[in-house]
């Protein structure tokens, strides 16, 4: 009766931040999307703050 116990390497889950950092395409996507969203929001805030001409 030789029961194999799972080793710590088999039961250990990879942390979410390590999975994100190990994926170059996800990093590229985040690096393009985050600045784009910030600049779009910044531009909308600038347009809204312009006073109306009378």
Image (tube, helix red, strand yellow):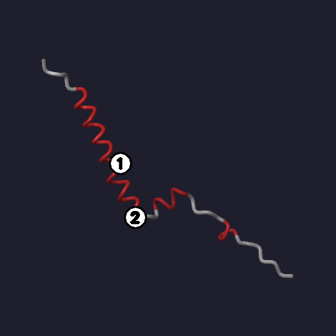
Q: Which residue is pictured at 46% across the width and 64% down the height?
A: 22
Along the horizontal axis of the image, is 15 left or right of 44? right
Q: Position of residue 17 (x, y in %)?
A: 51, 56
Secondary structure of the residue carrying tag 1 is: helix
Q: Quadrant of the C terminus?
A: top left
Judged from this view, the residue extending furthest toward the front is 54
Q: Which mark is residue 34?
A: 1
| Residue under label 2 | 24
Q: Which residue is pictured at 77% across the width and 73% down the height?
A: 5
Secondary structure of the residue carrying tag 2 is: helix
Dot placed on the residue nearer the N-terminal end, 2 or 1: 2
Q: Which residue is pictured at 39% across the width and 58% down the height?
A: 27
Q: Which residue is pictured at 35% across the width and 48% down the height?
A: 34
Q: Are marks 2 and 1 in contact (CB under 8 Å)?
A: no
Judged from this view, the residue extending furthest toward the bottom is 1
Along the horizontal axis of the image, is 21 left or right of 43? right
Task: Classify 10 Å Cα crowding around label 1: few (below 14), some (14-19), many (20 and above).
Answer: few
Answer above or below: position of 39 versus 24. Answer: above
Task: Classify 10 Å Cα crowding around label 2: few (below 14), some (14-19), many (20 and above).
Answer: few
């Amino acid at each position: 009766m030789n029961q194999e116990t799972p080793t710590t390497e088999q039961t250990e889950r990879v942390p979410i931040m390590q999975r994100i950092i190990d994926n170059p395409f996800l990093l590229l996507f985040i690096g393009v999307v985050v600045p784009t969203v910030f600049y779009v929001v910044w531009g909308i805030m600038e347009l809204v703050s312009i006073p109306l001409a009378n």
